[in-house]
């Protein structure tokens, strides 16, 4: 898959796609693995998302290391440990990781999108 086509977080399905390897540096082709969002998410995650979101805002949208680590842990647990924290961190390019974390966090806060 071309790296430019990788969508790390799909806001509609809430699936996460992580890069697992580079096939060809010149062609910018990568290997990926997609992780589905659990069909059932405990309400506990809403509470944690609110706390983490509030802290993000208090830090004026800057993410200190401690908050980054807690967000990483939150996302890993949210997806039922389908991947490790290391796989999550290393599976998202550095220029996209903060944005991806924020999208996931706000995806939790928005809940299920209904097509009425």
Image (cartoon, rainbow, N blue to C red):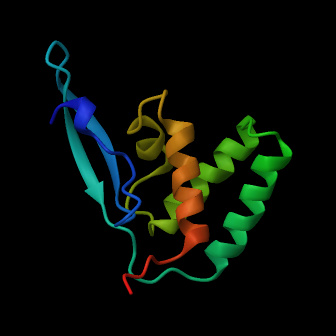
Looking at the picture, tell me which residue is in the foreground, 71 or 100. 100
Query: Residue farthest to the bottom?
Result: 116
Q: Position of residue 17 (x, y in %)?
A: 32, 49
Query: Residue farthest to the front?
Result: 116
Q: Position of residue 12 (x, y in %)?
A: 37, 65
Name the image quarter holding the N terminus: top left
Q: Where is residue 113 in the image (x, y as percent from the top left)?
A: 44, 76
State whether residue 13 is above or below residue 25: below
Quadrant of res 54: bottom right
**For this view, does 68 lie left or right of residue 40?**
right
Query: Residue farthest to the right?
Result: 58
Looking at the picture, tell me which residue is in the foreground, 77 or 26. 26
Q: How many labels does the image show?
A: 0
Looking at the picture, tell me which residue is in the foreground, 48 or 76. 48
State whether residue 52 is above or below residue 13: above
Q: Where is residue 7 in the image (x, y as percent from the top left)?
A: 32, 45
**For this view, does 33 lie left or right of residue 78?**
left
What residue sits 58% from the left and 49% below the top? 102
**For this view, does 103 lie left or right of residue 46?**
left
What residue sits 66% from the left and 79% below the top? 44
What residue sits 51% from the left and 67% below the top? 78
What residue sits 23% from the left and 37% below the top? 5
Quadrant of res 22: top left
């Amino acid at each position: 898959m071309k790296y430019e086509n990788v969508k790390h977080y799909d806001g509609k399905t809430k699936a996460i796609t992580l890069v697992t390897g580079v096939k060809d540096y010149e062609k910018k082709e990568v290997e990926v693995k997609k992780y589905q969002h659990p069909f059932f998410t405990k309400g506990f995650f809403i509470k944690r998302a609110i706390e983490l979101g509030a802290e993000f805002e208090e830090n004026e949208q800057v993410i200190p290391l401690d908050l980054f680590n807690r967000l990483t842990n939150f996302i890993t647990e949210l997806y039922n440990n389908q991947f490790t924290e290391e796989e999550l961190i290393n599976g998202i390019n550095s220029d996209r990781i903060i944005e991806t974390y924020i999208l996931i966090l706000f995806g939790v806060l928005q809940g299920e999108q209904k097509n009425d």
